Amino acid sequence: MKQETFESMVLTIKEQSELMVDLSYSSLLYDNTTLAKEVYELEEHIDHLFERLHHDLFQEVKEGNITVKTAQILLKLARAGEEIADAAREIADVQLRDVELHPILKMSIQESDEVLTKVQVKEPSILCKKTLGQLKLGSETGMTIIAMRHNNKWLYGPNKNTRIDAFDILFAKGPEDGEAHLIELADGITDEI
């Protein structure tokens, strides 16, 4: 296995753990168990990826294809991301166990100007078969697509050339009024961007 593949795995762990933190806090703020469950699924994926990375790195060191020092660095970085993922899961666990948040904590979370939302694009939506560059969602709705799931494949930090298809799941950040607009667009309720 090439070193670039290991670096890609570490980057995936980093990006997914960052998304998990956003999702877990949003699940508390908006009393949203769907987001909390998504955190659990992502955490399982990161655990599996970390185990695979760990195993494959040792194999490559054993075969002399990668140095021990390089393997240690990659494992330390991956471990940090995996620990962030574990912490995000603990935050989401508060939502799933229906634990009442302390009022001060709830107030501090609510002071955020941004919301994080998850929407699935339905087939009649104007978003279907268009790129983010064509749609200009960020400038038109205020919502920035930070991640997407197409079937079982994740894409982090999509760019202007990223195409949206029916049934894609979008994770977006932005103002609360932009969230409602994005949901209407994804559901096909409105065509007006």
Image (cartoon, helix red, strand yellow):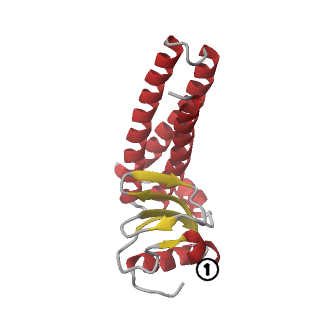
The residue nearer to you, when weighing 130 against 71, is: 130
Give left or right: position of 63 versus 97.
right
Q: Position of residue 8 (x, y in %)?
A: 55, 38
In this view of the protein, can residue 116 be seen by the observer?
A: no
* Circle 1: element type: helix
Q: Position of residue 54 (x, y in %)?
A: 47, 24
Q: Position of residue 71 (x, y in %)?
A: 58, 21
Rendered view: 16 above or below 121: above
- Residue type at mark 1? Glu
Number of numbered callouts drawn: 1
Q: Residue at x 58, y 29 (%)?
A: 3
Rendered view: 145 above or below 105: below
In this view of the protein, can residue 78 be seen by the observer?
A: yes
Q: Residue at x 42, y 28 (%)?
A: 51
Rendered view: 63 above or below 120: above
**Quadrant occupied by the C terminus:** bottom right
The residue nearer to you, when weighing 148 against 89, is: 148
User: Dot 1, how many residues are within 10 Å of its Cα: few (below 14), some (14-19), or many (20+)?
Assistant: some
Q: Residue at x 40, y 71 (%)?
A: 121
- From the image, tell me which residue sits under label 1: 140
Q: Position of residue 20 (x, y in %)?
A: 49, 48
Q: Place residue 136 in its image quadrant.
A: bottom right
